[in-house]
Amino acid sequence: MSEPLILGIESSCDETGVALVRGHELLANEVASSVDQHVRFGGVVPEVASRAHLQAMVPTLRRACEAADVDLSQIDGIAVTAGPGLMGALVVGLSAAKALAVALDKPLYGLNHLVGHVAVDLLDHGPLPTPCGALLVSGGHTSLLVVDDIATSITEVGSTIDDAAGEAYDKVARVLGLAYPGGPVIDKAAQAGNPKAIAFPRGLTSPRDLEKHPFDFSFSGLKTSVSRWVEMRQRDGLDVPVADVAASFQEAVCDVLTAKAMDLCEARGLTHFLIGGGVAANSRLRTLLEERAAERGIEVRRPRPGLCTDNGAMMAALGVEVVRAGLRPSSLDIGANSGLPVSTVLV
Ligand code: KG4
Ligand code: ZN
């Protein structure tokens, strides 16, 4: 049987993504971002994002079909983000996918955005060896997972008890007067800074915390600590060394993420580990994880940075796996679920 040709649609936050994937081959990946419209608010405004999705959906779909030289009649199914994400934003993509499913008489697969962040790596590195540990780090989520089967069996073993890692980047960027989204700008500013300049706290790493929360994260104390440090400098009439603060903050985040990732591999005897989500584009996270994994003989997989942030390819890639696994398509009356748990791959 030839590989399934899947149309992927993503609209959970501020990126309208439409992609075409055949098997593990990425044929087209078109993304229209409304990020410029959110910059002045310092974060995504749900109503603005929903309207932007409405305007971008059809043109982005057209561009993807042209880039892949595919006619919609050729596709084998439609994979769309059903959650988690912003409700109004999700509804736009889901409605578009349902309309296409009806008009083209093709199966609809309502899928989990978070699992899509893991699945997208298959486009770059082929089939996933299982079991595989995974760290999902995005603007809304920070979780440690064990993937036994990408289509049917994902277990969350830990997650953030407060802010997500990406959220901490975005908030700290605001404190430092840097642009939104904060991840890429802090990543860049940190290159010129000293990661040891300021000893910021590592959340949930004391022996007592590790006992109760071995695989959970907390970034809200770190964020507050950075704010206090910056406020004190300003109160004392001193300059804020942006590069050093960025590098020291980033080191605290990446240290905890990678330490707990390695603890999970050791606890479960995992020899393969994957990182996904927007923060997986971070240069320091990648280097530190690779260093620590290499010391333990663990193989790290990470999608190319351009596929780490939200896109349609991640949903199409997951759609391929779900079709291959022979799972039943979603009903046309499924709803968007802003709080969809990561263990539910297909709605
Ligand atoms: O996965 P994603 O595109 O959207 C969500 O599903 O949330 O992740 C967006 C998050 C933002 O918080 C952004 O600041 C962060 O990913 N991010 C980064 C980098 N690029 C994007 N964080 C750290 N370093 C980066 N290079
Ligand atoms: Zn995402």
Image: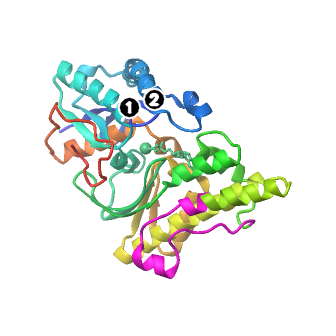
- Write down the region rendered in magenta: 197-223
Left or right for 117, reference 228 = left
From the top left corner, tell me how far across and down residue 176 is, in percent: 70, 48
Label 2 crowd (10 A; few <14 / some 14-19 / many >=20): many
Name the secondary structure under disc 2. Answer: helix
Q: Which residue is denoted by mark 1 in the rendering? A: 89
Q: At which x and y percent is residue 47? A: 44, 28
Eyeballing the image, is 188 above or below 224? above
Along the line of sight, which residue is nearer the eye, 250 or 1? 250
Looking at the image, is 78 positioned above or below residue 125? Answer: above
Q: Quadrant of residue 267 in the image?
A: bottom left
| Residue 199 among those drawn in magenta | yes
Which residue: 69% across, 69% down?
199
How is the rendered protein coloured? rainbow
Residue highlighted by disc 2: 49
**Picture coordinates of residue 323 (x, y %)?**
20, 42
